[in-house]
Image (spheres, rainbow, N blue to C red):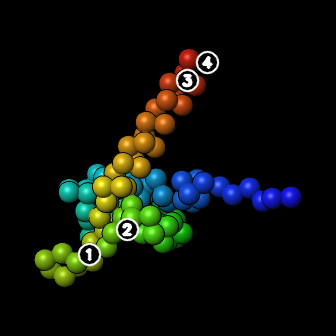
Amino acid sequence: MTEKKLSAFFTIYRKAGMELTLNILAACENNTCTESDFFDALKSNGSYPNEFYRTKLALLDYHLITYALNEEYEKVIRLTEAGEQVLNLVNEINGILKKHAEKES
């Protein structure tokens, strides 16, 4: 019997923190924020840093986020163009599902 594998998208998406990470970075100026500001935003959304750390490597591997240093040599997290595209598609899918769920109600 062959084992079914999840697609790359669902492998990442099912991890807690993936969508929240992309949303937080998209809300930042130039899709970039310092790591400390990012963790403050996580906390204000009722989330824990562990949720980010569970998905961090996958987000980096698929080039949805990157790390860099800003002018003050602070570590910053940036949403990449690919990350922006994935977030837009996720939002579109969520909109479609919501619209059809409302029609059925």
For this rendering, which residue is in front, 6 or 38? 6
For this rendering, which residue is in front, 2 or 85? 2
What number is the disc on residue 68?
1
Q: Which residue is mark 4?
A: 104
Q: Secondary structure at mark 3?
A: helix
Query: Where's the C terminus, which quadrant?
Result: top right
Which amino acid does the dot numbered 1 rest on?
Ala
Q: Which residue is mark 3?
A: 100
Q: Earlier in the sequence, mark 1 or mark 3?
A: 1
Tell me the distance, in whole angstroms, between the alpha carbons under discs 1 and 3: 41 Å
Q: Is residue 66 visible?
A: yes
- Circle 2 crowding by C-alpha within 10 Å: few under 14, some 14–19, many from 20: some
Q: Is residue 81 above or below residue 78?
A: above
Which mark is in front, 3 or 2?
Answer: 3
Q: Earlier in the sequence, mark 3 or mark 2?
A: 2
Q: Earlier in the sequence, mark 1 or mark 4?
A: 1
- Circle 1 crowding by C-alpha within 10 Å: few under 14, some 14–19, many from 20: few
Q: Secondary structure at mark 4?
A: helix
Residue at image location 44% in from the left, 64% down from the top: 62
Tell how many labels: 4
Tell me the distance, in whole angstroms, between the alpha carbons under discs 2 and 1: 16 Å
Tell me the distance, in whole angstroms, between the alpha carbons under discs 3 and 2: 34 Å
Tell me the distance, in whole angstroms, between the alpha carbons under discs 1 and 4: 46 Å
Q: In the image, residue 40 lies at what x, y percent?
A: 35, 65
Which mark is in front, 4 or 2?
Answer: 4
* Quarter of the rendering containing residue 101: top right
Q: Looking at this view, name the residue that lies furthest to the bottom.
A: 73
Q: In the image, residue 84 lies at what x, y percent?
A: 34, 51
